[in-house]
Image: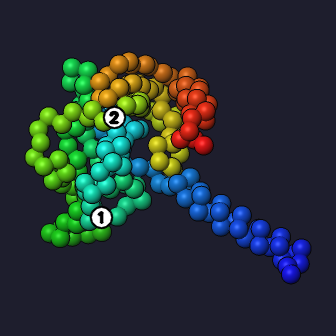
Amino acid sequence: MDTPNLLNMKRLLLTIIFTLFSGLKVFATAQFPDKINYNGKEYNLNSNPLEVYFEKNPNKRPKSEVRSSALWRGYVATFEIIDNQLFLKDIEIQYRDTTSKGSNNSNWKSVLNEVFDDQKNIQVDWYTGLLVLPQGKVVNYVHMGYGSTYQHYTILELNKGVLTQEKQFKSKAYEKFKEKQFQVFKQTEDYN
């Protein structure tokens, strides 16, 4: 039979373990963003539309030679909006450059043809959701995922890869928008 102090110690230990493991992403490093070309300009993306594809096709996920806490997904994808449709333009991974000297001997290479078997004009028709394009100076830096706040945001809403709406936000309005989106998400099965 466990004594009350032993039970309390067990609960405390379980709480600490749970907190450490459940919070791993909370303490994660800021990430290399995907890119998007939109209206003739390149933007960073605070969204990863290719992840939906890799969830359904895990054997297609490229394997990077370089492990980095700043690139948990293992690749950087580049997209483009053409005639209101989202297209995948490239997928790059890091590799070890054995010809260079020094501590930073990694480089980037395209693996688009390996992942999509030499397909051209890859329409991202599997993606329905929001693309977040941060712009301007960093208002608040957060060393976690895409947690930093920027001066302005463009939000692109897509339905099966087709652009249906664009919204512009300043940082405070974007934070309110995010909170409203989260409240709606809390009502879904995915949240439960």
Rendered location of residue 36, percent (x, y): 28, 34
On the question of residue 179 being in view, the answer is no
- In whole angstroms, how far apart are the C-alphas of marks 1 and 2? 27 Å
Above/below status of 126 relative to 65: above
Above/below status of 20 relative to 112: below
Give the quadrant of residue 72: bottom left
Mark 2 is on which residue type?
Answer: Tyr
What residue would you read off at disc 2?
Answer: 127
Q: Indicate the quadrant containing the N terminus: top left, top right, bottom left or bottom right.
A: bottom right
Rendered location of residue 66, percent (x, y): 30, 64
What residue would you read off at disc 1?
Answer: 66
Above/below status of 63 relative to 83: below
Image-based side of 177 in relation to 137, left or right: right
- What residue sits 61% from the left and 33% below the top? 187
Give the quadrant of residue 39: top left
- What residue sits 21% from the left and 55% below the top? 108
Q: Residue furthest right?
A: 4
Mark 1 is on which residue type?
Answer: Val
Give the quadrant of residue 41: top left
Marks 1 and 2: CB-CB under 8 Å?
no
